[in-house]
Every structure is written in structure tokens, then in C-alpha cells.
Amino acid sequence: MYVRVGSTNRRGDAELIEELRRFSRGEGFDEQLLPGLGSEVLDFRAASESFAPFRALRRRDLETLRLVGDHQGKTVPSVAGMILFGRDRERHFPDAWIQAGRFAGSDKSRIQDRIEIHSFPVQAVEDAIAFVQKHSWHGATIGAVRRIDRWSLPPEAVREALINAVVHTDYSQRGAPIRLSIFDHRLEIENPGLLPFGLTVEDLPHGVSRLRNRVIGRVFQALGLIEQWGSGIQRMTAVCRDAGLLPPIFEEIATRFRVTIPTLLVGPMVVDATEQAILSSLKEGQGLATREVAAIIGLSARATRKRLARLIDRGLVLEIGTSAKDPQRKYFLAEGGPL
């Protein structure tokens, strides 16, 4: 038996039927409670460290976030709580990890490097980005003083694709983790699970969104990893365009969803008027702090930091400081950047 869902025909197996039932009840798999476990299986310290840059996390907040819930008078973890912060989460969800590989050429016949990422999902996104950056140099601009390396893959686009994979994975499936594959001319990120019911591949570029894992999505939003529902795909596309790359390709393949980011340059790097103003403000070479750049371009410090981060990702601006929170850090124009 096959069921027509969106633009695909899906085999009506037990997993699909159960997903249909949850959809009809307005429930998500990650909202379900795990009554056989106690709340102590969640690593509260890890959760607190994730929230620390935003607010202090209290134990009662776990229930508000729906990471735990009440079952017959006992506090137990939810599926999302176990996936995000469970101490022994892979015993219950053995595919909740990321497999990453760098392959020579355009297929998987020759692997050059591989890594298994088993950290909690919030950290796993950062670990996967680090692996991509390790393998995605495509060139450099040699200046009089500095060598400026440039990414063949925009980190912001990679981050959006990875976050989408973690948030939209169907964790009820068994058999394969999230997979990240780097080839000579493209990056592929696959996650278990097709698009949620009522959503098609054609809807994605228009900002149409339907969240499969509501709790995981809300936690990622609270942690600043998701800014606005439905904007991730459009932002990923814009970042690729601005970097001179073809737009990402979105596909449903078997029971998995794949995002492909081509890495061959097809046009010049694009900067908008605000980014041009930032670059012009840095041309004197003395370095400016965030607040100084913000005053020049007329944006808030937060909006300015986001703009600067994008320019850093694209190799146009350098940041010098002891850490991301260093109040004395300054920004400089990278040699070879457009003016």
C-alpha cells in the first residue's frame, strides 16, 4: 500500500501509519514522554552550559521547555529531552549522531577522512562545521602582510543546513544517522525522514515551514540557533548567492531528505549597501570595535555583529581579540576584499 504525501508516494508501512496518527492528533514524536526513565537521565549541567550565554537555566525550566513531563505523578524525560541532553541517549536513539566524511572526486569510492560526532546536538552542529572548514579551503588572497584564506563553503549556509537536519530528522526511524559528505565540488547533508505532511520541496524556497520536532525546534530557537521559522532555507540560498555559488538543491530520496550545496564559483562575491558601508568604514586600517561600526552604519550592535560575522565567514573582514566576548576585539578589512 502506498500513501500520497505532498509530491511523493510513500510506502504505507507501520512507521508511516504511526506518523499519520501523530499528525492527525497534532502531536510530534519528540513531545512523547519516556515513562520507563527518570528525569535524572538528563544531563542538567550540559543543558545549563548550552543556555548560559542567554540565561540561567533552572530545573523547573526543563518542564517549561517540555524536556521533561509528568507521567502518573513521576517526572520523566521527553524524547526531545533525551535526544538533546540524555546521558545515555544513543542507547535509546542509536541514530542520533552525525557521520561526516571527505571523499576524493564526485562519489564515495575514495574516502580521505571521516569522523563520527556523538556530542550533544547543539555541540554536534559546531563539531560538524569544524570538520567542513577543515576540508573546504578553495584558495587564498596573498597580500603584502597577510595571507587571507577563503572558504569554498560559506559557514553560515553549512550551519543552516546542519540545524535543519537536526531539527527535522525523523528520530522514530532506525538504520542511519545524519550524514555529511564533502566532495570536490559539493557538500551533501542527509537526514532520516522526508518532509513533514503537507509540505513539498517546491514550498521550501518560498519560506513555507512545518516543524517536525517542535520541542527540539523551540530549544534551538531559545538558544539563538533558529531566528525565524521558515527563514533558514531562504537565508541559506541568499548566502550561497552572495558567495558566488549556485543555490542549494533540496531532494527527497527514499526515506531521507538531502541538501546539496555546490561549491563551484559561478559569479563574483556580492556585497549589499550595508556591507559595503562596513567595508568602507574599515579601510583606514586602524580597526574598529562593534559599537564604532554600528554608529557609522546606523544599526544596533546586535545587527552589526551579525553583519560582521557574515563578512568574516566570507573572508572579507578579520576579527582580532582574545575571544568572542572580548570587549576590546576589533575588526579589520581583509586584504583583497572589495571596496
Image (cartoon, helix red, strand yellow):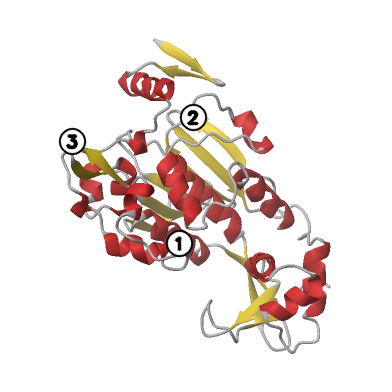
* Mark found first going from the N terminus, 2 or 1: 1
Which amino acid type is marked by label 1? Glu
Mark 2 or 1, closer to the camera: 2
Number of numbered discs: 3
Q: Which amino acid, mark 3?
A: Gln
- Vertical order, 94 against 200 (above or below): below
| Residue ID for mark 1 | 126
Which mark's residue is nearer the viewer, 1 or 3? 3
Mark 1 Cα-neighbour bin, 10 Å: few <14, some 14–19, many ≥20: some
Of the numbered discs 1 and 3, the one sitting upstream in the chain is: 3
Residue 304, image x, y percentages: 69, 69
Q: Residues within 10 Å of mark 3 (few under 14, many from 20)?
A: few
The label shown at residue 196 is 2
Above or below 134: residue 267: above
Front residue (pair 37, 168): 37
- Residue under the image location 26 percent in, 52 percent down: 86
- Horizontally, is 190 left or right of 267 in the view? left
> Measured from the top left, where is residue 276 in percent x and y?
81, 68
**Quarter containing the N terminus:** top left
Q: Quadrant of the C terminus?
A: bottom right
User: Residue 259 at x, y = what percent?
Assistant: 55, 42
- Is residue 338 visible in the rendered image? The answer is no
Closer to the camera, 126 or 77?
77
The residue identified by callout 3 is 72
Q: What's the distance in space between the residues labelled 2 and 1, CA to CA?
A: 26 Å
- Relative to 93, 223 lies left or right: right
Q: Secondary structure at mark 1?
A: helix
Determine whether 218 is above or below 212 in the image: below
Residues at badges 2 and 3 in contact (C-beta under 8 Å)?
no
Q: What's the residue at 33%, 24% (across, down)?
A: 15
